[in-house]
Amino acid sequence: SNFTMSSNDYDSSTYAGRCARFGSNSNSFLMKHQDKAVIEKMVDEQVKLLGGSTELYSRIDSNMMKGVFDPFFIREHCAIYSWRETFFSKHFPKNTWFTVDFETGFFGPEDDFITVPYQITRHFNRVMALASVKVNAELSWLKQQIYFESDANLSFEAANKYEWEEMTVDLLEKIGETEQQKLESYGDIGMGFSDVAHMIAEVYQTGPKKLEEMALKAVLLRNISSESSDFSPLEYLPTKIYKKAVNGMYNVEGDTPDNISVEGKEMFERMRHVFGNTNM
């Protein structure tokens, strides 16, 4: 889904297609005026949110481009996502951009929900590049007509995996669904019990995490930082711990964590019941 349509791919026989073609062409023109130094500063601001770890930023950026959910770094992904959301609304306020929904043929100035989560995860390098552009006064109208592709499914997935508010609301909303619907909605975005359990443990946390999880996260962070060298701390973990590093801390048969609220424990039990009736 990192594939981006070129202006030649749009159907010029429709109004929506012609708008998309215009937007694609004007974006290509603007991209030639991007400012690399300004983009570096944008990246630096995000790296600062992660304690200055460029390696962790690269990992999170890559995860977001691929739609990967990392149960050990939920808060860090949410922090980057939130920063990017604010960045997008600051640099591309209402009436300065448009999207085209080819499913419905809808053409409109904004459709935040199907566009912004997709853009700030799958295409954020281009979002930063377009934000960095400075154009002459006579071309300033181009910066009021920026085209961003939308993708309803990938936007839904991104918001569910990386947006803190959506994560908490979504868990609550899912209580009203049938168990089959719950499973299918998580299955659609590739999340199993361990992922959902980590999400609950993060959202409803009331006390410190287990020492084992804190130590494992430290090892994973060290592993990310040493990926450019031959040394990999994960290689030296006992098999049981290595499995948790790969699959997460929780499984359907395991205990409910102690360090979460009563509401969180109820949610955990409910999800255990839902996933326990399947092979997920």
Image (cartoon, rainbow, N blue to C red):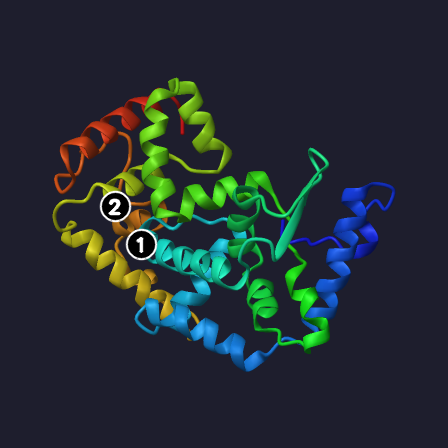
Q: Position of residue 39 (x, y in %)?
A: 53, 75
Q: Nearer the viewer, residue 92 or 240?
A: 92
Q: Secondary structure at mark 1?
A: helix
Q: Residue 134 is drawn in which quadrant? A: bottom right
Q: Is residue 51 left or right of residue 181?
A: left
Q: Is residue 227 visible?
A: yes
Q: Is residue 266 left or right of residue 122?
A: left
Name the outermost residue toward the right.
13
Task: Tell me which numbered mark, 1 or 2, is placed earlier along the sequence.
Answer: 1
Q: Residue 126 is drawn in which quadrant? A: bottom right
Q: Residue at x 48, y 62 (%)?
A: 90
110 shown above or below 280 = below
The Cα–Cα distance between marks 1 and 2, rounded to whole angstroms, is: 8 Å
Q: Residue at x 21, y 52 (%)?
A: 213
Give the amino acid at mark 2.
Glu
Give the amino acid at mark 1.
Arg
Q: Which mark is residue 75?
A: 1
- Pointer 2 residue: 202
Q: Is residue 226 visible?
A: no
Q: Secondary structure at mark 2?
A: helix
Q: Is residue 4 left or right of residue 226?
A: right
The quadrant of the rendering that contains the C terminus is top left
55 shown above or below 168 = below
